[in-house]
Amino acid sequence: MRLITWNINSLRLRLPLLQRLIEEQNPDVVCLQETKVPDPLYPQEALADLGFPHQLYRGMKSYNGVTILSRLPLEAVPGTPDWCGRTDCRHVAATIRTESGPVTIHNFYVPAGGDIPDPQENEKFAHKLAFLEEAADWFRNNPPRRSILVGDLNIAPLEHDVWSHRQLLKIVSHTPPETSRLLDWMKEGFEDAMRKAIPEPEKLFTWWSYRNRDWKKSNRGRRLDHVWTTPDILPGLKTIDVLRPVRDWTSPSDHVPVLMDIDL
C-alpha cells in the first residue's frame, strides 16, 4: 500500500495540486486534513475521477475537515468519539480491505492551540491539551490492531523535529505539555513510523511558515505531520518520503505531503 497524508489547507482551492500529486505518486490511499469544505459541497465526483471511488469525509465551512480517499473499498469505523464534544470535524477513521486482511486508518487534525502556551490564559491551548488526553484515553480503552494513524497532529515532539529545540521550547507546537501528551498518546499502541525510517538526529520537517520569504534557505521547519503504525504491521514498512518539492508548487499549502510505502 502506498499512503499519502497531507494538510492540504483547502481541498477545493488546491484540487489541481492534489491531481498533480496523485499523477506523480500514484497512491492507493490519500488522507487529507484542513479540507475546509462542508459536506454538501465536497467534490466527491472530481475525486472519484482522480481514481478514488471510495471516500470518507467530515467537513465544515472555512475550518478543519478531514477525508480518506481510497482505491480500495473502505468502511467507516463505528463509534469514534466526538472529540471534546465539539463536533468540529477533526477525525475520520476507516477500515480498508487488503489481501492480507483489514487495516484501520485513522486520520486526525489536532487543534493548533493558539499562540500562548498557558491553558489558564488561552482556551485554545487548554482545548489542545484536553484533545490529546482524550485521544490517549480512547486508544487505551480501544487498543489498536493492524492500524495506521496519520495526520496533522500540530506538534513536533522530538528535539530534531524543529529547527531549534532551545528556541522553540516555549512556542506552541513544541512545548513540554504538548510533546509529553503526544508521546503518551503514541504509547497507546503505536510506533513512530517516520522516525523508524528516518531516525534522529536527522532533522525532519513537514511544515514551513508562509512568513518565511525563502523557506528553503531559512529552513525553519517543524515536523507537525505524522505517520504512526501498530507494531504488528511495522515490519512491512518500506519507505517514508517527505515530499518537499510540493512546497514550491504554485499556491502551495504550508505543509508538504508525507508518503509511506508499506507491505500489508
Image (cartoon, helix red, strand yellow):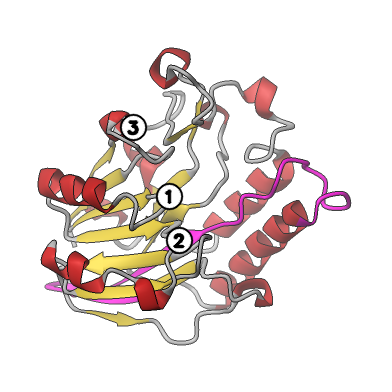
Residue at the spot of label 1: 9
Three-letter code for the amino acid on which mark 3 is drawn: Arg
Residue at the spot of label 2: 36
* Residues in magenta, as a range: 94-123
Three-letter code for the amino acid on which mark 1 is drawn: Asn
Q: Is residue 24 shown left or right of residue 66?
A: left
Residue toward you, 125 or 176:
125
Residue at 52% of width from left, 77% of height from top? 142
Residues at marks 2 and 1 touching, judged by CB atoms closer than 8 Å: yes
Image label count: 3
Residue at the spot of label 3: 247
* Residue 207, position as x, y percentages in the image: 46, 35
Earlier sequence position, callout 2 versus callout 3: 2
* Residue 135, position as x, y percentages in the image: 59, 67
Whether the magenta-drawn stretch holds residue 110 is answered as yes
What is the residue that sits farthest to the right in this orientation? 120
